[in-house]
C-alpha cells in the first residue's frame, strides 16, 4: 500500500508538472502541492475517460492514455489557477 502511494505521488508530480506546462493562461501561481494533487486527479480522470473510449488492453506503454492524463491534469491545473488566483484591486 505504501508503494502504491509513493507511485501515485511520483506519477502525480510528473503528470501535474506536464499538465501545468500545457495549461493555458497564468498557472504559475499554483503551488507545487496543488499541482501534485491536480496531477493525481488527472491520472485518475484521464485513465477513466480513456477507458470509456478505448480498449485498455494494449501491449507496451500506452502513450495515448498518458496523453489523456496530461490533458485532464491541464484542465485541473487551469481550474485550480482560476479558483486560487489573486484578485487585483
Image: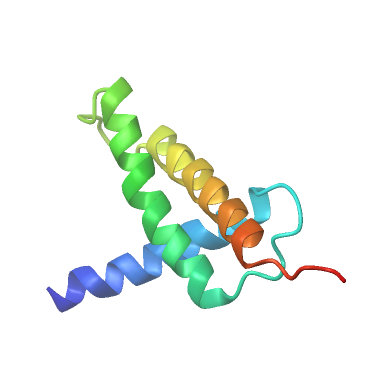
At x 69% / y 61%, what residue is drawn? 27
User: Is residue 62 shown left or right of residue 21?
Assistant: left
- Report if residue 61 is visible in the image: no
- Point out the residue furthest to the left here: 1
Instruction: Give how far across and how far down residue 17 sits, in percent.
Output: 57, 62
At x 45% / y 37%, what residue is drawn? 68
Figure disc tally: 0
Instruction: Indicate the quadrant containing the N terminus: top left, top right, bottom left or bottom right.
Output: bottom left
Measured along the vertical axis of the image, is residue 72 above or below residue 16?
above
At x 34% / y 33%, what residue is drawn? 49
User: Is residue 35 shown left or right of residue 26?
Assistant: left
- Report if residue 64 is visible in the image: yes
Report which quarter residue 30 is drawn in. bottom right
User: Is residue 54 shown left or right of residue 1?
Assistant: right
Q: How is the image coloured?
A: rainbow
Q: Give the camera-side residue of 70 and 41.
A: 41
Instruction: Give how far across and how far down residue 85 sits, in percent.
Output: 69, 66
Measured along the vertical axis of the image, is residue 37 above or below residue 49?
below
- Point out the residue furthest to the right here: 89
Q: Give the camera-side residue of 59 and 37.
A: 37
At x 45% / y 59%, what residue is drawn? 39
Measured along the vertical axis of the image, is residue 56 above or below residue 17?
above
Measured along the vertical axis of the image, is residue 75 above or below residue 36?
above
Instruction: Indicate the quadrant containing the C terminus: top left, top right, bottom left or bottom right.
Output: bottom right
Instruction: Give how far across and how far down residue 70 sits, in percent.
Output: 50, 46
Amino acid at each position: 500500500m505504501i508503494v502504491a502511494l509513493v507511485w501515485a505521488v511520483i506519477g502525480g508530480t510528473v503528470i501535474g508538472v506536464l499538465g501545468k506546462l500545457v495549461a493555458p493562461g497564468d498557472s504559475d501561481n499554483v503551488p507545487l502541492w496543488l499541482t501534485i494533487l491536480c496531477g493525481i486527479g488527472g491520472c485518475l480522470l484521464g485513465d477513466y475517460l480513456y477507458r470509456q473510449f478505448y480498449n485498455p488492453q494494449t501491449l507496451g506503454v500506452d502513450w495515448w492514455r498518458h496523453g489523456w492524463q496530461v490533458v485532464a491534469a491541464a484542465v485541473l491545473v487551469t481550474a485550480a489557477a482560476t479558483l486560487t488566483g489573486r484578485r487585483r484591486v
